[in-house]
Image (tube, rainbow, N blue to C red):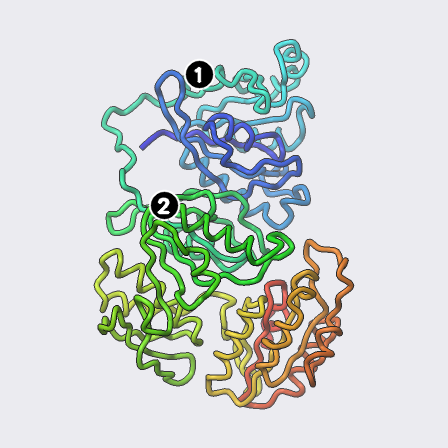
């Protein structure tokens, strides 16, 4: 295993630019705005001396004089503690530290506090004064940094000044090379974690590798960089990456392609092109929903092994004898080319989860997993947070929360609820973004109308301004009997005063509508 060097520093001193320069690849996202990097990420530096090492890029750390997290710039608000935790993990793994500072801004209190924190670790540390564009500036720009007491090197990550000297200094600080060190395993299975923002990809990665490797929060878009995470499962080397278009995956799975994020893609055709690129990057099979026309269009004509799953026997894998067993449970016979493979039972509701389980089964069986063992694990899966998550029961009314915010997701969730043993279903919905609400207005009407009652909040604009001149009242006018309110308290009071024992109340949306569910369930 290669030795590791960690890049440390306060926000916006140029760590990610330096990281990209040293690994000779634009892996880390860089921006003038502070707080872009949050999770730690790794890359291999192959120095000109022939010695290689792993470089760790970390998020910007803001510490006070007591080494406690302090309020950072706007881009870091709410993530300071998690970023510090990630940085501490990098420091534990690394043999050498590079403390990066900004030569243009000069010595800042946050630099001094972080230097004190780093010094306590007792590991070799090189002070890298960044944004120094030439030797003629070094004397004046470095003077005040001598107070930190570390050996120092001035450079410009952006323009490449002194980068070779930095490589040499880094190699000199590394521990003596171990000739018996374990080499990186070959034939690594690479897995891409793909999903909409805040669908729980980072939580799933953390659960599978058994550590808090990715920062997790309720804020959509928390993960920004493509983060490679090597791990070993049952003796097999694997690697998770929290994005999908930069990868060459051994196995790729596409559940469906929907008319979403049109403010970015512009059209469903552009979305299909993006997923086609994802599928074409796969080094192995592409496992797809054979009943989804957009998905089949994305993989049409690709020179790849295409494995399909779905409801009909035209698919490679399909479900026969589907049974709804009461509550959230269901079961079916998994078929492959007309032959029964095994019985599958699910503890999570909805036909969409039956499809998801078939996709999971196709991957497991391709990898050679025993069908009965696979079925046992599927049966034990309790579901993900904010996916039909039951929060409690109040006066006989069941309170649940779900992340669904696209019409297709909402319809699937509400249809699953209607198939269960509840008397009536209340959809408590927070529309998310003006563009989605305006462009998919009629689809929202159709999806929400599946519920017996609809209660809505005003639209959560998030990153957008209301240039569409669209409001929740426009949606409510199209759904007979629906109501809308300005506050979660009003929504909760109305819903709980009208819902009856045996009803299900489910909050829907990817914003903060879960807070309304917490009010109704009495959760602080």
Q: Residue at x 56, y 27 (%)?
A: 100
Quadrant where the N terminus sits is: top left
Q: Which residue is mark 2?
A: 239
Assess disc 2: are there few (<14), some (14-19) or many (≥20) residues with their C-alpha within 10 Å of its C-alpha. Answer: some
Q: Is residue 422 above or below residue 257?
A: below
> Viewer-proximal residue, 238 or 213?
238
Q: Position of residue 212 (x, y in %)?
A: 44, 50
Q: Nearer the viewer, mark 2 or mark 1?
A: 2
Left or right: residue 78 compared with residue 53: right
Q: Secondary structure at mark 1?
A: helix
Q: Secondary structure at mark 2?
A: strand
The answer to which quarter of the image holds residue 161 is top right
Q: Are marks 2 and 1 in contact (CB under 8 Å)?
A: no
Left or right: residue 268 compared with residue 294: right
> Viewer-proximal residue, 28 or 270?
270
Q: Residue at x 66, y 82 (%)?
A: 495
Q: Which residue, as the protein is rendered here, is positioned at the far front? A: 301
Q: Which mark is residue 168?
A: 1
Q: Position of residue 517 (x, y in %)?
A: 60, 73
Q: Residue at x 59, y 67 (%)?
A: 405
Q: Position of residue 512 (x, y in %)?
A: 63, 64
Whether residue 103 is visible, yes or no, is yes
Q: Is residue 74 above or below residue 113?
A: below
> Viewer-proximal residue, 155 or 466?
466
Q: Earlier in the sequence, mark 2 or mark 1?
A: 1
The answer to which quarter of the image holds residue 359 is bottom left
User: How much space separates mark 2 and mark 1, taking CA atoms?
Assistant: 30 Å
Q: Is residue 410 above or below residue 461?
A: below
Assess disc 1: are there few (<14), some (14-19) or many (≥20) residues with their C-alpha within 10 Å of its C-alpha. Answer: some
């Amino acid at each position: 295993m290669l030795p590791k060097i960690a890049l440390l520093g306060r926000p916006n001193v140029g760590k990610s630019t330096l990281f990209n320069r040293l690994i000779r690849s634009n892996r880390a996202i860089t921006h003038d705005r502070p707080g872009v990097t949050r999770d730690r990420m790794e890359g291999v530096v192959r120095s000109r001396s022939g010695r290689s090492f792993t470089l760790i890029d970390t998020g910007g750390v803001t510490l006070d004089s007591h080494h406690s997290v302090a309020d950072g710039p706007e881009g870091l608000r709410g993530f300071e503690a998690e970023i510090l935790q990630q940085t501490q993990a990098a420091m534990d793994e690394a043999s050498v530290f590079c403390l990066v500072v900004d030569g243009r801004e000069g010595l800042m209190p946050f630099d001094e506090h972080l230097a004190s924190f780093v010094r306590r670790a007792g590991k070799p540390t090189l002070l890298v004064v960044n944004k120094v564009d030439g030797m003629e500036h070094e004397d004046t720009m470095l003077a005040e940094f001598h107070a930190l007491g570390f050996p120092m090197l001035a450079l410009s990550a952006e323009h490449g000044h002194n980068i070779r000297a930095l490589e040499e200094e880094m190699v000199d600080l590394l521990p003596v090379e171990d000739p018996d060190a374990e080499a990186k395993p070959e034939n690594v299975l690479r897995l891409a974690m793909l999903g909409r923002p805040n669908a729980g990809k980072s939580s799933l990665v953390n659960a599978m590798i058994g550590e808090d490797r990715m920062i997790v929060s309720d804020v959509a878009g928390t993960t920004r960089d493509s983060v490679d995470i090597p791990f070993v499962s049952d003796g097999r080397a694997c690697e998770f990456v929290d994005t999908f278009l930069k990868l060459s995956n051994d196995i790729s799975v596409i559940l469906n392609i929907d008319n979403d994020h049109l403010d970015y893609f512009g059209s469903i055709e552009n979305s299909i092109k993006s997923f086609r690129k994802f599928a074409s990057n796969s080094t192995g099979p592409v496992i797809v929903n054979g009943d989804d026309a957009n998905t089949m269009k994305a993989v049409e004509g690709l020179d790849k092994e295409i494995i399909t799953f779905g409801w009909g026997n035209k698919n490679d894998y399909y479900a026969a004898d589907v049974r709804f067993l009461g509550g959230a449970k269901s079961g079916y016979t998994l078929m492959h080319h007309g032959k029964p493979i095994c019985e599958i039972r699910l503890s999570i509701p909805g036909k969409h989860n039956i499809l998801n389980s078939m996709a999971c089964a196709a991957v497991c069986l391709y990898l050679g997993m025993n069908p009965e063992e696979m079925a046992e694990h599927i049966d034990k899966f309790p579901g993900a947070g904010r996916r039909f998550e039951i929060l409690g029961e109040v006066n006989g009314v069941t309170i649940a929360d779900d992340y669904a915010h696209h019409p297709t997701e909402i319809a699937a969730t509400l249809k699953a609820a209607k198939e269960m043993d509840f008397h009536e279903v209340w959809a408590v919905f927070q529309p998310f973004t003006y563009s989605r609400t305006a462009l998919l207005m009629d689809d929202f009407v159709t999806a929400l109308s599946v519920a017996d009652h609809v209660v809505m909040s005003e639209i959560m604009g998030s990153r957008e301004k209301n240039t569409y001149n669209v409001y929740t009242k426009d949606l409510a006018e199209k759904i007979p009997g629906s109501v809308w309110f300005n506050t979660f308290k009003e929504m909760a009071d109305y819903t709980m005063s009208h819902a009856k024992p045996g009803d299900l109340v489910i909050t829907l949306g990817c914003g903060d509508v879960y807070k309304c569910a917490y009010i109704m369930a009495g959760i602080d």
